[in-house]
Amino acid sequence: MSENKQKLMIVEDDPGLQSQLKWSFEDFEVIVARNKKEALAKLRRHEAPVVTLDLGLPPDADGTSEGLATLEQLLELNPNLKIIVVTGNEDRQNAVKAIALGAYDFYQKPIDAEILNLIVKRAHHVYKLELENQSLLKDHGHSPLNGIIANSSQMLKVCRTVEKVAPTDATSLLLGESGTGKEVLARALHDLSSRAKKRFIAINCAAIPENLLESELFGYEKGAFTGASKQTIGKIECANGGTLFLDEVGDLPMSLQAKLLRFLQERIIERLGGRNEIPVDVRVICATHQNIEQQIKDGQFREDLFYRISEITIRIPPLRERSGDSVFLARSLLNHFVDTQTLNKNIRGFSQDGIQAIESYTWPGNIRELQNKIKRAVIMADSNLVTADDLELNNEQQAAMPFNLRQVRDQSEQSAVLRALSLLEGNVSKTAELLGISRPTLYDLMSKHNIKP
């Protein structure tokens, strides 16, 4: 019958409490471990999804060092493990510390069998739901916004705009610094549109020499120029029925801007060396890191073309302006690289100084720089936690603080809430505990600062 029961491992060195806990969990298949060594061995053997852990384990029965070390090593074996820390009445600080290290929940002695049973059953339920969710993501994988990882109000606003604009055929202009994810958003606009099953054609206007760019965009007929040995269809024509993404459109030569304007107005093209007008049904999305308004003033970009390509303008904030997103993104990238790199390493997160380094760095290269730093750190890390040294970040740059005390307080308040939510992966109960406030107070602060749970 035990094969049909849910498994629970109890890590406790007191024989009396072992018996009490075993009796409390008669509906479970209970595995008992008296110390760290036994706990690690039995988790490997029985693979229990939920563990109750007493922090006072030998040889440090009066302290917490051995219990916290056991917590970390159990999570190394199974990062999805739900560990419920059992503590004394005066040990709340260490319980919160354990949660920051990855514990699922904590429970204070004396033991109330009914309440602890509810916590354990809920932990099993959450563990099961997480496994199902992971399975669904693998099986049904792709979502149009899958490539966009965001937690900040600034970026969530951009995502909502993308969802509203995507079903239309409006020509859209994405503005943002290099590395902010302009092509990812352009693909999302395509994938959420009625053209999703058609082609998405991307061309970087800055990467192709000026003398080749026209033929690349519009195509050419046989004999149009020396070396044109056959008729070749251009990128615009290739995208017929789908979406054309013109990246770095701000670098488009003036000689081509007029021809692109005519195409956008008439929706017809002529191949180089040809005389036939070819109608093209294509949605156009443009992107640039340039200051287009300044380019217009300097005579480097046509004002009429700017109004054509910017029916909808979406400004993508740089990473330094996306409150809390740097740590949120870093965790996601870390998990991705650990899963895809065949390094035989059991890296499960960042050290505290690693998180602080990520938070305080200004990320001039945005997400692309973050991606490169995390990938390098995964390769170079010597322990199961990525440290500030592994990341090699220069944190000399500091953001200017306002002098207005209300602004300072609001900014610090928002930063503290976002840091805690990022650290505890969005768990509101644990975040409130870490901040030393009640859940209703935390919800009030989140509402005040427009932070979504």
Image: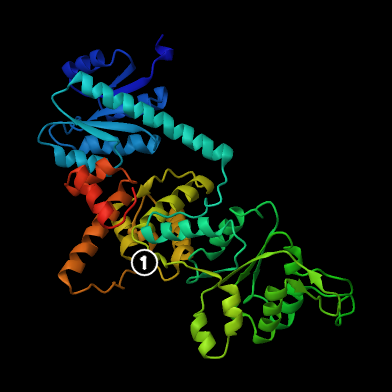
- The quarter of the picture where the N terminus appears is top left
Residue 430: x %, y % from top left: 25, 42
Residue 155, compared with residue 432, is above or below; it is: below
Farthest residue to the top: give it.
1
The answer to whether 269 is drawn above or below residue 122 in the figure is below
Residue at screen point 49% across, 37% down: 134
| Helix, strand or loop under label 1 | helix
Q: Which of the two residues, 366 or 51, is positioned nearer the viewer here?
A: 366
Query: Which residue type carries mark 1?
Result: Glu
Vertical side of 445 occupied by 294: above or below: below
Give coordinates of residue 276: x percent, y percent: 86, 75
**Rendering coords of residue 31 (x, y %):** 32, 19
Using residue 387 as the reference point, say whether residue 278 is left or right of it: right
Q: Residue lying furthest bottom in this view?
A: 298
In the foreground, 42 or 249 = 249
Corner quadrant of residue 139: top right
Instruction: Residue under label 1, please give it.
Output: 321
Residue pictured at 75% horizontal, 64% vertical: 238
Tell me, yes or no, if residue 381 can be seen here: no
Query: Could you classify mark 1 by the number of other residues whose Cα lies within 10 Å: few (under 14), some (14-19), or many (20 or more)?
Result: some
User: From where the camera sits, is residue 220 visible?
Assistant: yes
Query: Looking at the image, which residue is at 56% across and 71% down?
Result: 311
Residue 15: quadrant of the picture: top left
